């Protein structure tokens, strides 16, 4: 048993140009005071698991390590299989694994492989914005089935979804599970109802489950493909260690494709476009994460839940103008700012320029995001507290 208590209090200010989201806020305001951090892009403002850092150092120091083109080591594949079995009750065959260099390019490739220009890709906004790009930049149509906001809990619009799935030109569903940005963890009943509609109308489910390890107490994630053989055979599941263990920069992910025909078509397309593959460092980091860092993961989930409760309590007691929506999974909090009665341009100015509260505008995620913002809670609680206190001071003087 790992009894290590990990450091989730320290934070490294990445002002050296090595971080995408730090570069974004520093481009916006080069003179930010110390202690201001970005709560935007979904990587963590936390140190990586020390086991991973030590393991990568050992790999680089080993006299037989060569940084050439990498194939997946057997130990990596074994680690993925064991992790999915123990953490997600999903028994897979090793042949089902297709290694990819990031979940976003992986589902972009899938949209191109399994649909044709002019066809529709169904998605449910507000949703992770690369979903839109996956359709638009490859001459597919965004077919939006906006989620229904039922007093703070989002639900699928079943009537509209059935209608859209019935259109034979809509061949693919890009599905976000758990849902980014609204934080829903879909129930078995919801997943099965969605799957039955897709099977009935022959819609292929591309299930982005990259956040499936970050599930908060009281909720349970169900991998879509585990619903049964029929669902597995008409779906592709995309995931990675990147969100879970803060490894996005290593570009290591995988698609799980039980259907041999789909798998061969997908890998054939990847060869035609010379799709990138993971590196030796990415394979090793994933292997270490899945075999040695589960204690770290459990403590991260505790931190995120603590931060969620802190935000709820702070807003309830000191920022009643801001309403946190219930958060079931991911580390991304959806905040309702509509009572401030501002348009989205003014809201961003207030948050970014005046409060130095760097969050992602809800409009980034399409229809239904107006008046909302998404906040990354994977950070030390003290920095989150400071950010909310700055916001409180600005709103108090409106």
Image (cartoon, rainbow, N blue to C red):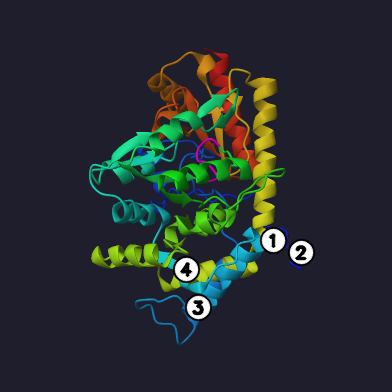
Q: Nearer the viewer, residue 364 or 40?
A: 364
Which quarter of the image is occupied by the N terminus? bottom right
Disc nearer the start of the sequence (2/3): 2
- Looking at the image, do the residues carrying marks 1 and 2 touch, with CB atoms under 8 Å apart? yes
Against 73, residue 229 (above or below) is: above
Q: Position of residue 101 (x, y in %)?
A: 39, 62
Tell me the number on the disc at residue 96.
4
Determine which of the numbered discs, if any, sits on residue 3 in the image: 2
- The Cα atoms of the two marked residues, 2 and 3, are separated by 25 Å
Residues drawn in magenta = 177-182
- Determine crowd level at label 2: few under 14, some 14-19, many 20+ residues with C-alpha closer than 10 A: few
Residue 129 found in image quarter: top left
Residue 27 in the image: state x and y as whole percent: 35, 39
Disc nearest the viewer among 3 and 1: 1
The secondary element bearing badge 3 is classed as helix
Q: Are the two marked residues, 3 and 1, in contact with CB atoms closer than 8 angstroms?
A: no
Q: Position of residue 33 (x, y in %)?
A: 49, 36
Q: Is residue 275 visible?
A: no
């Amino acid at each position: 048993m790992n009894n290590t208590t990990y450091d989730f209090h320290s934070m490294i200010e990445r002002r050296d140009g090595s971080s995408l989201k730090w570069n974004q806020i520093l481009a916006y305001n080069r003179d930010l005071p110390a202690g201001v951090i970005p709560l935007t892009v979904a990587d963590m403002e936390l140190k990586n698991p020390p086991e991973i850092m030590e393991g990568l150092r050992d790999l680089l120091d080993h006299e037989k390590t060569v940084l050439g083109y990498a194939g997946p080591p057997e130990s990596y594949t074994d680690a993925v299989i064991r992790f999915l079995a123990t953490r997600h009750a999903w028994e897979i065959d090793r042949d089902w694994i297709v290694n990819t260099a990031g979940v976003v390019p992986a589902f972009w490739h899938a949209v191109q492989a399994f649909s044709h220009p002019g066809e529709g890709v169904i998605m449910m906004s507000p949703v992770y914005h690369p979903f839109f790009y996956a359709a638009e930049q490859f001459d597919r149509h965004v077919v939006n089935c906006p989620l229904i906001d039922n007093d703070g809990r989002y639900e699928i619009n079943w009537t509209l979804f059935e209608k859209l799935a019935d259109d034979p030109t809509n061949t693919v569903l890009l599905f976000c599970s758990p849902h980014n940005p609204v934080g829903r963890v879909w129930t078995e009943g919801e997943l099965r109802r969605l799957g039955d509609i897709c099977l009935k109308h022959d819609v292929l489910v591309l299930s982005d489950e990259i956040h499936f390890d970050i599930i908060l107490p009281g909720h349970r994630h169900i991998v879509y493909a585990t619903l049964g053989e029929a669902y597995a055979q008409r779906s592709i599941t995309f995931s990675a260690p990147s969100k879970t263990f803060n490894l996005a920069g290593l570009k290591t992910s995988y698609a799980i494709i039980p259907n041999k025909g789909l798998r061969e078509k997908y890998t054939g397309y990847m060869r035609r476009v010379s799709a990138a593959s993971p590196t030796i460092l990415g394979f090793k980091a994933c292997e270490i994460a899945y075999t040695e860092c589960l204690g770290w993961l459990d403590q991260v989930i505790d931190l995120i839940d603590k931060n969620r409760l802190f935000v709820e309590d702070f807003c309830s007691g000191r920022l009643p103008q801001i309403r946190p929506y219930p958060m079931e999974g991911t580390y991304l909090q959806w905040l309702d700012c509509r009572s401030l009665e501002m348009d989205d341009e003014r809201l961003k100015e207030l948050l970014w320029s005046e409060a130095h509260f760097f969050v992602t505008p809800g409009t980034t995620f399409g229809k239904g995001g107006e008046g909302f913002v998404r906040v990354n809670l994977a950070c030390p609680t003290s920095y989150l507290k400071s950010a909310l206190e700055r916001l409180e001071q600005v709103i108090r003087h409106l």
